[in-house]
């Protein structure tokens, strides 16, 4: 199984279920409230670990109860947390999530995630040397992501960037990325293109962009310049929070299988993830994923 290094955020998700989203200035009564472990980095680390990858995570939590709970939960998933540091006098990252039906709206307050520094990455250089593949997202400072890309390059390890939340990226960073994994909106933002031009963007970078497309699965362009679609799997969605993270975690867990097979596994894992509550609640084990695929008759 692949050795995966995750550089990213760790959040406590504060989730309110509502019948509909409030308008500006409106107070609505919600239906339920729960806290779940989250953060794009932590979610991707857990998704990969459940699928059997050997995972190390670099991140930061605050010196508070959330930070202690989140770190110990990652340890319980079998993730190496040696490089998760505590930022004194700082709150852990949180995400305020409003769930209406299976859709969500999210506000992230980075807290300690904003303290993850290029020096933290340099300090963890040995973990780059050990990894087969490195993945990061955009919930920690960009200077830190750049340093992670640089170290991945220094150690000749593929650097996967999930450009979420969406932001414009410069060519220097994009050149260091082995694979970019945006959704359609994030792709437009990252490259500074209209969303409608995603096909051309994929065709200009064969094998370098894997675009997730929700119920349409995922798209990439093969070495021959032909657009390829990995279709999604039909499930009843309960909570779509973390579906993209499950996709990314599965992708790196199965990195050695190559893009067509790894993206099939990733679409199946993402489908299973939305069937339970919380970002990490529905992330499957490898056995659950293989059972699901067998039940689909190997379809999709
Ligand atoms: O991608 C879902 C995640 O985004 C949530 O777990 C939340 O913490 C935010 O980071």
Image: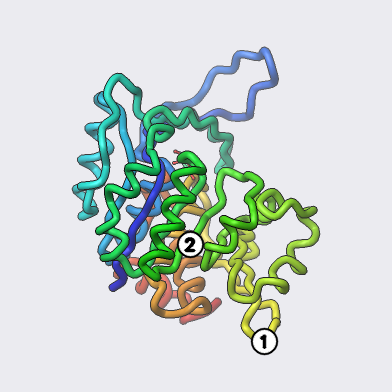
The one nearer the camera, 218 or 41, is 41
Q: Position of residue 158 (x, y in %)?
A: 44, 68
Look at 43% across and 50% down and name the residue there: 147
Q: Position of residue 101 (x, y in %)?
A: 57, 39
| Residue 14 seen from this side | no
Q: Picture quarter containing residue 224?
A: bottom right
Q: Position of residue 106 (x, y in %)?
A: 54, 34
Asked if disc 2 is less than 8 Å from ligand 1, the answer is no
The one nearer the camera, 128 or 166, is 128
Say which quadrant the C terminus sits in. bottom right
Is residue 153 toward the left or the right of residue 64 in the image?
right
Q: Position of residue 25 (x, y in %)?
A: 67, 13
Q: Count neighbours of disc 2 (C-alpha within 10 A) and say few if under 14, some if 14 to 19, many if 20 or more.
A: many
Q: Which residue is mark 1?
A: 224
| Residue 212 seen from this side | yes
Look at 66% across and 52% down and name the residue there: 190
The image shows a total of numbered marks equal to 2
Is residue 251 toward the left or the right of residue 194 in the image?
left
Q: Marks 2 and 1, Cα distance to the nearest angstrom?
A: 22 Å
Please say if the residues under marks 2 and 1 sit with CB atoms less than 8 Å apart. no
Q: Is residue 298 above or below residue 282?
A: below
Q: Decide which of tag 2 and tag 1 comes sooner along the chain.
A: 2
Look at 41% across and 66% down and name the residue there: 252
Q: Which residue is mark 2?
A: 160
The mark found on residue 281 in the picture is none
Is residue 240 toward the left or the right of residue 156 in the image?
right
Q: Count neighbours of disc 1 (C-alpha within 10 A) and say few if under 14, some if 14 to 19, many if 20 or more.
A: few
Q: Is residue 220 above or below residue 106?
A: below
Asked if disc 1 is less than 8 Å from ligand 1, the answer is no
């Amino acid at each position: 199984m692949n050795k995966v290094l995750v550089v990213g955020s760790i959040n406590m998700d504060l989730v309110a279920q509502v019948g509909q989203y409030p308008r500006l200035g409106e107070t609505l009564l919600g239906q339920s409230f729960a806290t779940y472990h989250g953060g794009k980095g932590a979610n991707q680390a857990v998704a990969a670990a459940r699928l059997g990858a050997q995972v190390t995570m670099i991140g930061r939590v605050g010196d508070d109860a959330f930070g202690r709970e989140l770190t110990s939960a990652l340890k319980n998933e079998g993730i190496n947390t040696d490089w998760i540091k505590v930022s004194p006098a700082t709150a852990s990252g949180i995400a305020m999530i409003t769930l209406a039906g299976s859709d969500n709206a999210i506000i992230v307050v980075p807290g300690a995630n904003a303290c993850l520094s290029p020096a933290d990455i340099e300090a963890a250089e040995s973990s780059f040397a050990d990894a087969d593949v490195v993945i990061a997202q955009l919930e920690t400072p960009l200077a830190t992501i750049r340093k992670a890309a640089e170290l991945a390059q220094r150690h000749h390890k593929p650097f996967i960037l999930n450009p979420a939340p969406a932001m414009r990226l410069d060519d220097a960073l994009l050149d260091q990325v082995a694979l970019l994994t945006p959704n359609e909106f994030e792709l437009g933002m990252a490259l500074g293109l209209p969303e409608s031009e995603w096909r051309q963007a994929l065709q200009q970078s064969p094998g370098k962009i894997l675009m997730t497309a929700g119920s349409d699965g995922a798209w990439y362009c093969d070495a021959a310049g032909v657009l390829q679609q990995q279709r999604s799997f039909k499930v009843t969605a309960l909570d779509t929070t973390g579906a993209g993270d499950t996709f990314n975690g599965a992708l790196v867990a199965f990195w050695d299988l190559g893009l067509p097979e790894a993206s099939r596994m990733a679409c199946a894992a993402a489908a299973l993830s939305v069937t339970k509550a919380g970002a990490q609640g529905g992330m499957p084990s490898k056995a659950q994923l293989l059972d699901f695929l067998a039940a689909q008759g190997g379809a999709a």
